[in-house]
Image: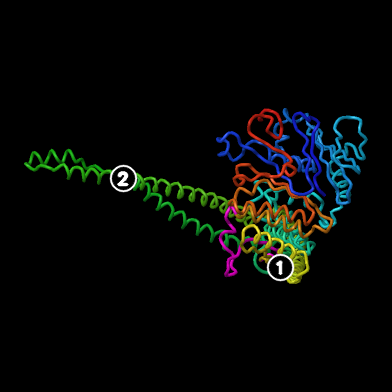
Amino acid sequence: MKISRIYSNFENEFKTIDFCNGFNVVLGQIFHPENLQKDAHNLGKSKLSELIDFCLLKGRNPVFFLFKFPLIFTKYVFFIEILLNSGSYITIRRGVDRNTKISIKKHDEGRQLYRGDGWSWDYEDEPIGVAKTILDSYFDLAVVGAWDYRDAVAYCLRSQEDYTEVFKLDKFRGQHVFWKPYLGHILGFEASALVRNYQLKNEIDALSIKLIELKKLIGAVQGDQEEILNRHLQAKMDVAKSLKWQMENLNFDESDKKHIEDLTGEIDSELEDINRVKYYLSARLRKLQKTAGAGGERFNIDSVSQLFEEAGVVFGEQIKRSYSELVEFNRQITSERREFVRQQKEELEQNLDDISVRASELNFERSKKLSYLNSYDIFSKYKEVSQRLAEVDFSIVEINKSLEVNESIKNLEEDYRKLLRDKGGIVDSIRINRDEVVVDKEGIYNRIKDGFEDYISGVLSKNGVITTEQNGEGNLDYFAGLIGSDGKITGESDGYSYKKILCIGFDLAVMSAYSDMKFVRFLYHDGGLETLDDRKKIEFIEYVRTVSSINGFQYILTVIESDLPAGFKFPDHEVVRVLHDDGPSGRLFNIPSW
């Protein structure tokens, strides 16, 4: 799967670009020196990779330049011609306006132009989801397994934003489950276990949250909640049974006894406590009110000074100033103290209001019970007991509901324990698989490692390493970096300059390792050369030329001409497009800047 050409329905505004099967260069020329200081030269070399991604059916994103400026780009229809691993070609047509309607045509010869009307398409205006499935069958990338070609293409198009991490692209900002298992699969690990481990973690977390919510619903406390609820239910049922007997036999001695116990016990006792608290709070409030009414500083330094002058004593200015500062300090302290007193008063008044309300409720309840005890009307007592029975029956219904919730909690807790057991088994299988993969010298993992180390040695004259370890959750973490002569990772691995080179090296190693399999066979790297010194730039170019030729994959590099060593020139057949900053004709789109 290589890119053969890309073109549009407006040749005069977007010129057709034909790619070589091997090494390709998109060269940017800066004729105006002030543009060298800009992060983006506005030539379009980065936009080309985005355009290729669009033609390969990347999802719609409103910040993508084609959609961000609809007045400019709505009229465009783009075509990309792909060389299949089988030797045939397909052309994909996708417009900006009707970007979810895709047309596909298979053909035997390359360098075709299917712009305009009148062409017969094998699949015309198919929904984008259907079109992706069709392309999957055409590309036949058996290596990607359960994933589709879009996952593979993501690692073949490195933008400037994709050089911050070797394994995680900027486009993979979501959960690890969306990219790490695929990466593990490409590195040769058992991907299904990796996917399942992430799924189990999500299921466990979701179940844990649900259990917390259910326990809050029934006010679960430490201990056996079912045992607590059953004892509470039995107590309520005993009360209900007693109340029913009293009503059936018109004998309310038990209720009379209960009312007396409530009066002499709970109600009177709580009222007594409330009165003590009210007395204490009222005393504190009176003291605070007295404090708040106290006057401030009444000492007048000028009056005292005049008095002493009349007595023949003169105050020095320093004494006056020191005392004035003391008065100001005292004023500030007094102000803060008054604010504190105000807050304390409000709090005490609120507490008094609260307990006064509670006292009123208790006195009302006390009055009701006394009225009941003083009543000789058996029908009034029957009515009161009937009301109590209704309240108890309601409590019984609520307890039974809580027991049902508790049963659900027990079932969920069993599910939770099962998920934990399953996850433990998956984590063990990941560990066993990892141990097997890292020692398999003929496996894909070690082929990628060897390719990466060869690249680092050939380009940087350093030692490189790729390692994999299992983290605390049982998932795999991947690392690529440089090691010193002592075998330890060096700080150079984290530097921006070398990070780009490490990213490129990993991509090249993967492409080389899969060169004889059904996999993508093109790489597009936007920049990277600018971080090296001149000698290493030459080493890099020669290495990529050689390795892409030997392994039969296509390599596309974008580079600014001023970043090349002095006097270095690419052969004409390698330069597929020259962009420059001297007017619209030098841009990817030969139109005014947008």
Q: How is the image coloured?
A: rainbow
**Which quarter of the figure has residue 49?**
top right
Q: Are marks 2 and 1 in contact (CB under 8 Å)?
A: no
Residue 316 at x, y percent in the picture: 13, 43
User: Which of the pair 468/293 is nearer the observer?
Assistant: 468
Q: Which mark is residue 231?
A: 1
Q: Which residues are magenta?
A: 472-497
Which sits in the foreground, 147 or 283? 147
The disc at residue 294 is 2
At label 1, which amino acid type do we have? Arg
Tag 1 secondary structure: helix
Q: Quadrant of the C terminus?
A: top right
Could you tell me how far apart the alpha carbons at marks 2 and 1 are, in whole angstroms?
A: 59 Å
Q: Quadrant of residue 34?
A: top right
* Nearer to the camera, 300 or 266: 300
Three-letter code for the amino acid on which mark 2 is drawn: Ala
Residue 409 falls left or right of residue 102: left
In the orientation shown, which residue stands out farthest toward the front? 567
Up/down of 60 relative to 361, above or below = above
* SS under mark 2: loop
Q: Is residue 256 magenta?
A: no
Question: Which residue is at 61% across, 37% downward?
Answer: 30
Instruction: Please rate how many residues cluster around mark 2, counting C-alpha atoms within 10 Å: few if below 14, some from 14 to 19, many from 20.
Output: few
Question: Which mark, by number, is residue 258?
Answer: none
Residue 346 spot, x, y in % from top left:
45, 46
Earlier in the chain: of badge 2 and badge 1, it is: 1
State the image coordinates of residue 287 (x, y, percent, origin top left): 36, 51
Name the residue rendered at 37%, 49% in the picture. 288
